[in-house]
Image: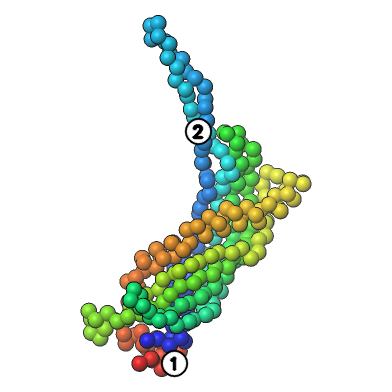
Amino acid sequence: MMTSDQARATVQSLVDLAIRKSPHQYDGKKNWEKTKKIWAGVRFRRDGLKLSTHRRWRDVRHGLQTRYHVQFPGDASAPRPVIAEVRQVTHCNGDASERAGWTIECELATPLDFSARIERWNLGVQWYSVEVSGHMEIRLTVHGQLSSYPDYSVLPPAIVIDPTVTSASLHLDALHVDRISKVGGEVAETWGEMVEKIVNEILIDDINEKLHAKLNKAIDKKRDDLRFSAVDWMSDLTATGDPPAP
């Protein structure tokens, strides 16, 4: 079994690997081009002496719709400006359904540049359309579990690291608007006050809805990378100065 320091070092290395492999940019949308069906009149048709009617409907854009782009500042080839800290490591005993391991709390913070196009539609009529750009500081809190077990299909047995994200939440710590297009004067000031609310309700909430599942899905895609030679794994852990656990 790993010691708490070894568990912390393992999680830290996994987080650092994830940061290095993270994409430079991300594009998303919330309700973009969403439509609502409305009545568009009645069509009459005569067949001899028989008159028939057919109600017509059409789909029109409706509601608050947003398309956004976020990216790390700087060049795509530069190291990601993410500060990652494994804050808490607690041992947990396994039961019949799961292995003994460690409960982990990790926090990551990073600056991001963003741009968004925000449109308000009412039954096919566009009330406004603005483009907002700026930068923000976000913080990601992740709770998870980490266990390890030997794979006896090879000799010496390989060590399999098994991380699972149990919860994850993204928080907006700071927001700075650099530009708001197509508005000015008091309207621009009003939009400056509204942007933080929109970013929280649309971008942050939209990402949080899918974040937990996406993180676990990303881990599942990298399971082959979480299988290590027992000799190499123990060498990496003892390099921190801690003796291997019996």
**Where is residue 183 drawn, in percent x and y?**
70, 44
Residue mark closest to the camera, 2 vs 1: 2
**Where is residue 82 drawn, in percent x and y?**
55, 71
Badge 1 element:
loop
**Where is residue 242 drawn, in percent x and y?**
44, 92
* Image quarter in which the N terminus is found: bottom left
Q: Residue 242 carries which label?
A: 1
Image-based side of 144 in relation to 1, left or right = right
**Residue 10 in sight:** no
* Image quarter in which the C terminus is found: bottom left
Q: Which of 177 and 37 is in front in this view?
A: 37
Can you tell which quarter of the image residue 155 is in?
bottom left
From the image, tell me which residue sits under label 2: 37
Contact between marks 2 and 1 (CB within 8 A): the answer is no
Badge 2 element:
strand
- Dot 2 or dot 1, earlier in sequence: 2
Q: How many marks?
A: 2
Image: 74 above or below 133: below
Q: Specify the amino acid type for callout 1.
A: Asp
Q: Give the distance between the C-alpha atoms of the residues marked 2 and 1, in whole angstroms.
A: 65 Å
Residue lying farthest top?
49
Image: 67 above or below 101: above
**Identity of the residue drawn at 43% across and 62% down:** 213
**Identity of the residue drawn at 49% across and 29% down:** 58
**Where is residue 209 drawn, in percent x and y?**
50, 57
Image-based side of 142 in relation to 221, left or right = right
